[in-house]
Image: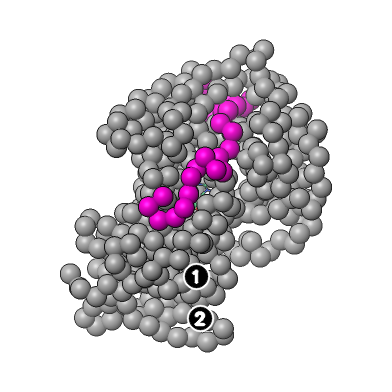
Amino acid sequence: MTTDKRVAILGAGAGGACAALELASRGFQVTLFERNSEAVAEASLVNEGKIHLGFIYAMDRSLRTARKMIDGALVFEDHLRRWVDFRAADAVSTPFLYGIHRDSLMGLEQLLAHYAACADYYRQRAAELGRDYLGMGTGFRFHPVPEAEYPVDLNPEFIPQLVATTEYAVDPRHVARCLRRGLQTAEGIEFRPGHTVTAIDPLKGNGYRVTVQHDGQERSESFPQVVNATWYRRLPLDRPLGIEPPGPWSHRYKFGNRVAVSLTRAQLPSITCVQGPFGDLVNFEANGFFLSWYPTGRTGMSLAESPPEWDAGYDRAQRMAVFHNSLGHWKQRCARLDELRFSDEDVDPVGGVIYALGTEDVDHVATRLHDRYDIGLQSRGGYHSVDTGKYTLAPLMGMAVADRVSGVA
Ligand SMILES: Cc1cc2nc3c(=O)[nH]c(=O)nc-3n(C[C@H](O)[C@H](O)[C@H](O)COP(=O)(O)OP(=O)(O)OC[C@H]3O[C@@H](n4cnc5c(N)ncnc54)[C@H](O)[C@@H]3O)c2cc1C
């Protein structure tokens, strides 16, 4: 193995940022290229922040996806705390309810059996690792909620069954601020915002030439090792180096609207409707709420190597139309939304691209979008491409990248 401890990381989302912070802590000199003017500005910012315990992945009956999520969730806070000043409790949502929606692809009994299997794995892993989910001391619990005890005006006509859980989201905007501060202050990281990587070429012997566009100019630089953490923009960089996705994939553009209005715990539930193309509400209390309704908020789907530039394609009015449409659907299911007072100025109708294996949408029983275990690292020599898979897994993946680059795994 080379003793040259320089490494280029492409992409400063949560995956690339965690890898950079861990590698710097191991004495590597990291050059972190990011096309945006700041770090953590795409999927890792606009997502819902749910730190998955496997509940949503009931359609993967092998339990591999749920196990992967639990592995990531159990180290999420501890790993972040290695690198940045972070406490999940500072930015956590209220606990999630799972609403079994009318026309769900799975019924309550099947879902409860899946949740029980997740709880068993959680207990086993938590004991092995000596770790606790988000440092919350809540463990893994769930129980069905009778209709008479439905909170905050949830409409049983649409949501005939409900399960209370101890799953949470952590405000990704808070995590983004922590990671940005960490990248600024860590020794051994040269962060280069506004740098778009356009090509990676293997050099004769060892190493790679990284070609970057910055300020209208193209420049190249050589590194012994390169990590591609550009999420849905990985494929065109990977393929010339012989790395192919493990199966047919798709890209989806999904709105993750945020509303900056301070809420109490009782004003809005955090709820995920399952199982199929439904949506989520997340109550971050003082930090506002997240709202998405899949049938109106999943506005793009592409099977191409590079999806359209969806994000640049919407003006504010179009984005607000998607938000209001999604809000309308949610109001039918949760009348309490009608009582919340906020104006259009409080709404940030952002969205992001989701890359995943599977070519048919989530309303298909057999689509691979229901599983997320076939993710992680693919390497050719000193070139490593990382599919973060989920936000939940970013710190776990950051550590896996660091192990691979430093020759541990
Ligand atoms: C609306 C929505 C909700 C979601 N909700 C959840 C959730 O609740 N829980 C969960 O676990 N997951 C969720 N996800 C998925 C999660 O957001 C992603 O899996 C995760 O954020 C991916 O992290 P990443 O660092 O790999 O990608 P990103 O955060 O997208 O980072 C990639 C970075 O690479 C940069 N980049 C790209 N190309 C180049 C280039 N050529 N040169 C330089 N830089 C480049 C980008 O600018 C970006 O900063 C959600 C996603 C969306 C869109």
Residue 140 within the magenta-colored segment of the rendering: no
What is the crowding at mark 1: few (fewer than 14 residues within 10 Å), some, or many (at least 20)? Answer: many
In the rendered image, which quarter contains the C terminus? bottom left
Q: Position of residue 81 (x, y in %)?
A: 41, 50
Q: Which residue is drawn at 73% across and 23% down?
A: 153
Is 177 or 110 nearer to us in this picture?
A: 177
* Mark 1 Cβ inside 8 Å of ligand 1: yes
Instruction: Let me know if residue 102 appears in the view.
Output: yes
Query: Cα distance, mark 1 to mark 2?
Result: 11 Å
Q: Are marks 1 and 2 in contact (CB under 8 Å)?
A: no
Res 213 label: 2
Q: Is residue 61 left or right of residue 142?
A: left
Which structural element holds mark 1? strand
Q: Can residue 322 be seen in this view?
A: no
In the image: residue 167, left or right of residue 279: left
Badge 1 amino acid: Glu
**Amino acid on which the number 2 mark rests in the picture:** Gln
Q: Is residue 106 one of those drawn in magenta?
A: yes
Q: What stretch is highlighted in magenta?
A: 81-108
Whole-percent x, y for residue 342 in the image: 80, 44
Image quadrant in which the N terminus is located: bottom left
Residue beneath disc 1: 34
- The x and y percentages for residue 395 are 40, 51
Q: Which residue does the image show at 48% across and 18% down from the upper left?
A: 109
Seen in the picture, residue 20 relative to 400 is either above or below; the reply is below
| Distance from mark 2 CB to nearest ligand 1 atom below 8 Å | no
